[in-house]
């Protein structure tokens, strides 16, 4: 499904806030932190918004958790059309971009999950292979060939308060799996849940 310029214009005033959601803070990280790992929705999950999803965990500690769904698409279209909706870019911007559903929280907020070969002042490194950037300039860099080698643009995110994810894990709503950058950035969204499930186990 192609995104339309009117949709881009509608989200342009809201997406890419000055900062990302709180990702860690100053509290001591949990010994069993799932940062940099995958959450795989189990058949027992009760929330239909997450049925069949795979989530890359950006942050997880005693204060809560934050992640991005990596296997649901919203639409796709020319990158220069998207950027023109923000009033930047031009004919030198090439390529297409797929918009992903990152989660139900703040669906007008944008995040780019990407390989760690790109870094800016708005970039947070999750691990040696994956980083997240929350400023619009990364999309312009991608369009000009100066961006990360791999990327995933998501609107919205999945968030949990203190202890919430732990309770969901104990109910076996989620399984955990090691993160694989090939799976994270793979364009074949339909098979991601199956592939992640093949490596998933009970979490706690």
Image (cartoon, rainbow, N blue to C red):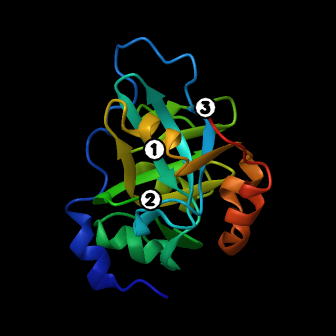
Which residue is rendered at x = 33% and y = 30% of the image? 162
Q: Estimate the x, y position of residue 111 in percent, counting from the top left.
A: 42, 51
Disc 2 from disc 3: Cα separation: 25 Å
Question: Quarter of the image holding residue 52?
Answer: bottom right
Res 145 quadrant in image: bottom right
The residue depicted at 40 percent of the width and 51 percent of the height is 158
Q: Residues within 10 Å of mark 1 (few under 14, many from 20)?
A: some
Mark 2 vs 1, N-terminal side: 2
Horizontally, is 159 left or right of 100 in the view? left
The residue that appears at 57% across and 47% down in the rendered structure is: 56
Q: Earlier in the sequence, mark 2 or mark 3?
A: 2
Q: Is residue 135 visible in this depiction of the protein?
A: no
Q: Name the residue under label 1.
A: 168
The relative height of residue 51 versus residue 4 in the rendered view (above or below) is: above
Are the two marked residues, 1 and 3, in contact with CB atoms closer than 8 angstroms?
no
Give the answer, above or below, for where 145 lies relative to 80. above
**Relative side of 44 to 109, left or right:** right
Query: What's the mark number on residue 32?
Result: none
- The vertical placement of 86 against 119, above or below, is below
Residue 93 image point, x, y percent = 52, 68
Q: How crowded is mark 3: few (under 14 residues within 10 Å), some or many (20 or more)?
A: few
Query: To which residue does mark 2 refer?
Result: 102
Query: Which residue matches tag 3?
Result: 204
State the residue at coordinates (39%, 53%).
157
Between discs 1 and 3, the one toward the N terminus: 1
Q: Is mark 1 on a helix, strand or loop?
A: helix
Q: In which quarter of the image is the C terminus?
A: top right
Q: CB under 8 Å between callouts 2 and 3?
A: no
**Helix, strand, or loop for circle 2?**
loop
Q: Which is closer to the viewer, label 2 or label 1?
A: 1
Indicate which label's residue lies in the foreground, 2 or 3: 3
């Amino acid at each position: 499904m192609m995104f339309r310029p009117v949709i881009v214009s509608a989200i342009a005033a809201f997406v890419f806030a000055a900062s990302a959601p709180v990702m860690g803070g100053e509290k001591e990280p949990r010994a069993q932190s799932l940062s940099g790992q995958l959450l795989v929705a189990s058949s027992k999950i009760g929330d239909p918004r997450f049925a069949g999803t795979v989530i890359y965990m950006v942050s997880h500690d005693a204060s809560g958790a934050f992640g991005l769904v990596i296997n649901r698409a919203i639409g796709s279209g020319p990158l220069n059309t998207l950027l023109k909706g923000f009033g930047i870019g031009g004919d030198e911007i090439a390529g297409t971009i797929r918009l992903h559903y990152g989660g139900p929280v703040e669906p007008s907020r944008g995040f780019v999950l990407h390989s760690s070969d790109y870094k800016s002042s708005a970039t947070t490194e999750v691990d040696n292979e994956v980083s997240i950037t929350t400023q619009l300039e990364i999309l312009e860099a991608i369009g000009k060939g100066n961006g990360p080698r791999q990327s995933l643009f998501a609107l919205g995110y999945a968030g949990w308060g203190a202890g919430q994810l732990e309770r969901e894990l104990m109910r076996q709503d989620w399984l955990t799996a090691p993160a694989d950058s090939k799976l994270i950035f793979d364009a074949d969204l339909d098979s991601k849940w199956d592939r992640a499930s093949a490596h998933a186990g009970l979490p706690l």
